[in-house]
Image: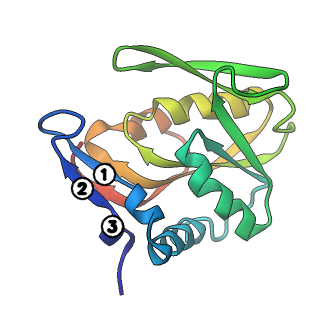
Amino acid sequence: MKKVEDYIRSIPDFPEEGIIFRDVTSILQDAQGLKLAIDELIKRLDGVEFDVIAGTESRGFIFGMPVAYALGKPFVPVRKAGKLPCETISESYDLEYGTASIEIHKDAILPGQKVVIVDDLIATGGTVEAAIHLVERLGGEVVKVLFLLELVGLEGRKKLAGYDVASVVVYEGK
């Protein structure tokens, strides 16, 4: 029986020499791989009580939406700045060279709601840390942070200390 990592394409020297890029589009292109990835994410929510799933743009949408659908939960998009049509709150985070911002609708999370955040990858953890701050500013409680892939060498979990974090596939390097 295949595992999720069997569907992940590793591309050496992309985007620069010495980096191994872990490509999840190869999962999406295979019906069995996609089903397995979603099933594995859902397994990591067994026993977790929550009200809503939030996903970060854009691959958090790809993986978070089918999980929300399968579990009968609402889905909240956390988007790049300027993409949401209603009143939002914003959170900035650091990139390798500069900063970026993400936003969420002000009415997307109600005070006291228990939230699971889904994304495809944890690398440095900056995007998801910002998403956590948005949820908490709206009065939500982040009860789980869920990733398809984790690059341990980039130490993203350090930014998420104190949160319940799970990953389906873990790569020790960067």
Residue type pointed to by label 3: Glu
Q: Nearer the viewer, residue 138 or 58?
A: 58
x then y, percent, for residue 113: 82, 45
Q: Nearer the viewer, mark 2 or mark 3?
A: 2
Left or right: 13 in relation to 2: left
Q: Dot 2 surroundings within 10 Å: few (below 14), some, or many (20 or more)?
A: some
x then y, percent, for residue 68: 71, 60
Q: Dot 3 surroundings within 10 Å: few (below 14), some, or many (20 or more)?
A: some
State which quadrant residue 158 falls in: top left
Q: CA distance from mark 3 to mark 1?
A: 10 Å
**Which residue: 66% across, 35% down?**
78
Q: Which residue is mark 1?
A: 22
Q: CA distance from mark 2 to mark 3?
A: 10 Å
State which quadrant residue 73 falls in: bottom right
Tell me, yes or no, whether the two marked residues, 1 and 2, touch with CB atoms within 8 Å.
yes
Q: Secondary structure at mark 2?
A: strand
Q: Which residue is mark 3?
A: 5
- 10 versus 7 height, above or below: above
Disc ID at residue 10:
2
Q: CA distance from mark 1 to mark 2?
A: 5 Å
x then y, percent, for residue 18: 12, 38
Residue type pointed to by label 2: Ser
Marks 2 and 3, the one that precedes in the sequence: 3
Count of number-bearing discs:
3
Residue type pointed to by label 1: Arg
Tell me, yes or no, whether the two marked residues, 3 and 1, touch with CB atoms within 8 Å.
no
**Which residue: 49% across, 38% down?**
160
Left or right: 160 in relation to 84: left
Q: Secondary structure at mark 1?
A: strand
Q: Nearer the viewer, residue 154 or 9?
A: 9
In which quadrant will I find the C terminus? Answer: top left
State which quadrant residue 42 falls in: bottom right
